[in-house]
Image (cartoon, helix red, strand yellow):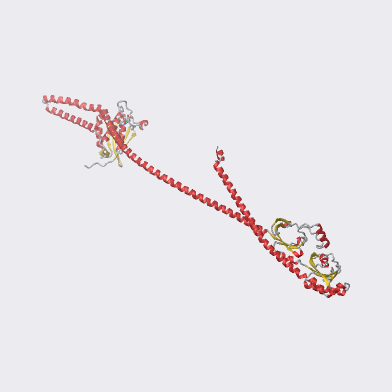
Amino acid sequence: MASAAQTVLPSGSGSRLLRRFVLWLLVLVCCLGLALLVWRWTENAAIDKLRLAGAQRLDSYAVSLENLLSKYDFLPGTLELNKDVIALLQQPDDELLRAEVNAHLEQLNKLSKSTTIYIVNLQGLTQASSNWREPDSFVGDNVAFRPYVRDALRRTPGGFYGVGTTRGEPGYFFAHGIYHNGHMLGVATVKVNIEKLEKGWVQGTDKVMLTDAHGVVFLSSVPDWKYHALAPLEPAVLQELEVSRQYFSHALLPLGLRELRQLDNGASIVATPAPAERTRMLSQTRSLSPRKWQFVYLSDLAPAEASARNAFLFTWLSEALLVMLVLYARQRRRLGRQRQRARLDLQRAYDHLETMVAERTASLQQMTHNLSEENVVRRHAEQKLRQAQSDLVQAGKMAVLGQMSAGITHELNQPLTALRTMSDNARVLIERGRLDEAKGNLTTISQLIARMGALTGQLRQFARKADASLKPVPVAAAITAALFLVERRVEQERVNFRMSMLSQGVHALCDSNRLEQVLVNLFTNALDAMDGCETRQLTVSVTRSFQKAMIAVSDTGPGIPEAIRNHLFEPFFTTKPQGQGLGLGLAISEQIIREFGGMLLVESTTAGGARFIIELPIAEPETT
Ligand code: ADP
């Protein structure tokens, strides 16, 4: 269930995701497009710069070549001014003359720093040469097949670059007809080495080539490229070059430059041939018109490509940075909005809290009001309870009196009977004149009446409603008063009563009437318990311990079984037969003592009887 719920996305969030994806794709494509544009633009700008530099180089190379060649242009023509040269051409067998011309040519060659200077007759046979001393001297060689000789003989003086047929040394050949009195006698030829120019062409990784009219490379800053054709040569051209032996025995294979892209103004981007250094280069050409030669300048594109690549990367990084900045700004805005929302929520919560506090305060006030009302009700109830308790105490008291009524009646009946008998006797004694005896009888009668008056007075005192206020009460007096009410029973039931005042003159803070009520209860219970027992001993002891007065009432009855001890102080708990016990005595007594601020405890005596202990606060006796 849970996994199914996870895989199902709400359609709204799905389309939002798709929209976001498309947007980011668009941003990516735009960034890539812009970076590519920058790449292209930077590359083009770098190529333009390379073209400008290349064009300048080509111009300077062309000028230096022309300067070099033009220096020798006039040299062959000057030889027809030499008489010996003319004479030798006229008398080709004059060896002396040949030697002189050879020496002259040798000297001239040295001065002009050319490679070789030689004189050819109209048949193409070399008559004299500056290298006459060398073992491979040109003297005697027939060079009629050489195009520059042919051209000169046809009266069109010209130049020619070729590889020497004797030594295989390349050079530029200048040829000029030698005329005497308007007649051509032969041809003067100067060979110049222009290979030294190549050395000045080496510029870093750039490459320079000089090609002839057929596109054959004869000078190059890359030695391996020499005597290769820019494009494959036609068979007819190959044949012609074979005949003229312009490039001696070189095969003139295609160089293998591959054009990659055509640019305007004859420039192009090419791939260089050697596999090891196959790089893209910018190719520019410059024609040297009279000789139909062509300079090819190849600029290395690697720096341009590197700067284009760098520009691409820079743009790409800048775009990434920009995107990140935009994202950062958006994030900040979102955070700001969230913070604003949180602030509003907080404010709302605060307002809500305030309302709640106000409501709670109002309800608290209401509760306080209710409480004070309840307090009034409670106080009222407490009053009622106190009243009820007091009534109960009174009822308990009445119950004790009720229980004692038989005894009291007996107590009053006996003196009354005695009174009747004695008053009758007194009358008889007076009639008989026995006045002393009658007087004695009357004294006894008055004693009996006094005793009855004391008893009824004690009963009235016991039955009156107790005073609520607490006063210092002499404990011994209270015990005596209580004993007075049960005295008769004690005597009748032959109970041994013992009072031990371990502390004299002890006063307790209580109400004497109610304390007597408690003591009468305890005495009555003790007498009830000892009814039928062999030993009947009722002991009351008074002790003082710290601030407490302790009254212990012990008997020699059967004691209180453990099972009922916890229920003793419960109202209406009694073990006495119906009509004899109400079960209120101990409950009321305990309550009375508690109201005095004391405690009513029960324990067993060592003899097995029961002992009730009243603990009351000590009070100093009133001085008045
Ligand atoms: P009542 O005397 O009406 O039964 P009380 O509250 O005075 O009510 O006493 C409760 C019960 O406690 C008595 O029924 C009795 O079983 C027991 N009791 C009280 N005093 C003693 C005593 N001194 N010895 C043994 N049992 C006692």
Q: Residue at x 64, y 55 (%)?
A: 40
- Left or right: 118 with respect to 383? right
Q: Quadrant of residue 77?
A: bottom right
Q: Position of residue 23 (x, y in %)?
A: 58, 48
Residue 556 seen by the camera: no
Q: Position of residue 311 (x, y in %)?
A: 62, 57
Q: Quadrant of the C terminus?
A: top left
Residue 240 seen by the camera: yes
Quick one: 471 or 373, which is closer to the camera?
373
Q: Quadrant of ligand 1?
A: top left
- Left or right: 292 with respect to 622? right
Q: Quadrant of residue 70?
A: bottom right
Q: Position of residue 225 (x, y in %)?
A: 76, 60
Q: Is residue 257 above or below residue 425?
A: below
Q: Quadrant of residue 375?
A: top left
Extreme residue in the right direction: 93
Q: Residue at x 26, y 42 (%)?
A: 620
